[in-house]
């Protein structure tokens, strides 16, 4: 019997950690989010911290490398 119910394990990191991993500034990550180049969610409501979808960050970095 196979399990057809798949779940996605999306992981998130902080803006600062994403900047460290990407080798760019905190503000560059914020700009990429604003332009829609990075997927992020806000933790804790309107004034909460932004969390970056790691899959989105990897995809953006791979795209940047291939340009």
Image (cartoon, grey):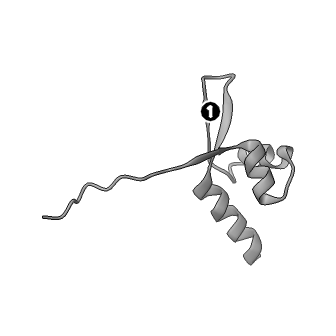
Q: Residue at x 73, y 77 (%)?
A: 66
Q: Is residue 53 above or below residue 50?
A: below
Quarter of the image with the C terminus in it: bottom right
Q: Which residue is depicted at the point 60% across and 30% down?
A: 43
Of the 4 image quadrants, the one containing the N terminus is bottom left
Which residue is farthest left? 1
Q: Name the residue beneath numbered marker 1.
A: 42
- Helix, strand or loop status at disc 1: strand
Q: Pinpoint residue 35: horizontal percent, then vertical percent.
A: 74, 48
Which image quadrant is residue 48 in? top right
Give the total of numbered labels.
Answer: 1
Q: From the viewer's perspective, is residue 15 above or below residue 37?
A: above
The x and y percentages for residue 56 are 62, 56
Which residue occupies the extreme bottom position in the image? 66
- Please identify the quarter of the rendering in which residue 5 is found: bottom left
At 65% from the left and 45% from the top, the residue drawn is 13
Relative side of 12 to 35, left or right:
left
Nearest to the observer: residue 34 or residue 25: 25
**Label 1 Cα crowd, 10 Å radius (few <14 / some 14-19 / many 20+):** few
From the viewer's perspective, is residue 16 above or below residue 48? Answer: below
- How far across and how far down the image is residue 51, in percent? 64, 40
Task: Relative to 34, say whether 59 is above or below.
Answer: below
Give residue 41's quadrant in the image.
Answer: top right
Give whichever of 61, 36 is nearer the camera: 61
Residue in the picture at 68% in, 36% down: 50
């Amino acid at each position: 019997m196979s399990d057809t119910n798949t779940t996605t394990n999306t992981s998130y990191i902080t803006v600062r950690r994403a900047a460290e991993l990407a080798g760019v500034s905190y503000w560059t990550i914020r700009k990429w989010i604003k332009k829609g180049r990075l997927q992020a969610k806000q933790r804790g409501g309107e004034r909460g911290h932004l969390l970056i979808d790691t899959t989105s960050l990897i995809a953006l970095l791979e795209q940047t490398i291939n340009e």
